Amino acid sequence: MADIVITSVMFVVAFLAAVYAFFTSAFWAMGWAECETCDPPLGMAYLATWGGIAVATVIAVLGVVLAAARGRVMWIWPTVALGLIVVGYVIGFELLAHYRSR
C-alpha cells in the first residue's frame, strides 16, 4: 500500500516538474528575439528539455506498468522520471546560457 501512495505522489511531483519545465522553457525564445543566428541553440535547448520530458514520461509509465505486473517496487520509476526532467531542463538552460554568453 505504501508503494502505491509513494508512486502516486512521485507521479504528481514529476508531472508538476514537467509542466513547469515545459511552460517556462516556452519563454526562452523571448530572450533570443534580437539574435539572428540563435535558431540552432534554441532548437537544441528545446530538444533537450522537451525530449527529456517525453523520455521521462515513457520511462515512468512503462516502468510502473512493468513493475506492477512483476510485483516489484514501483516508486522508483516516477522518481527516475523526475530526475530526467530536471536534468533535461538544466541541460537546455545551460545550452542557452552558453551560446548567449558568446
Image (tube, helix red, strand yellow):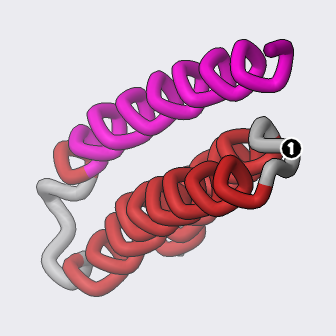
Q: Which residue is mark 1?
A: 73
Q: Quadrant of residue 43?
A: bottom left
Tell me residue 101's x, y (percent): 55, 65
Q: Can residue 87 be seen by looking at this rendering? A: no
Q: Quadrant of residue 79?
A: top right
Give above or below for 27 relative to 63. above
Q: From the viewer's side, name the closer residue of 80 and 28.
A: 80
Q: Residue at x 23, y 44 (%)?
A: 26
Position of the N terminus by quadrant: top right
Report the span colored magenta.
Answer: 1-28
Secondary structure of residue under mark 1: loop
Q: Residue at x 76, y 42 (%)?
A: 74
Tell me residue 27's x, y (percent): 24, 39
Q: Can residue 11 be seen by looking at this rendering? A: yes
Q: Quadrant of residue 69?
A: bottom right
Q: Residue at x 80, y 49 (%)?
A: 71
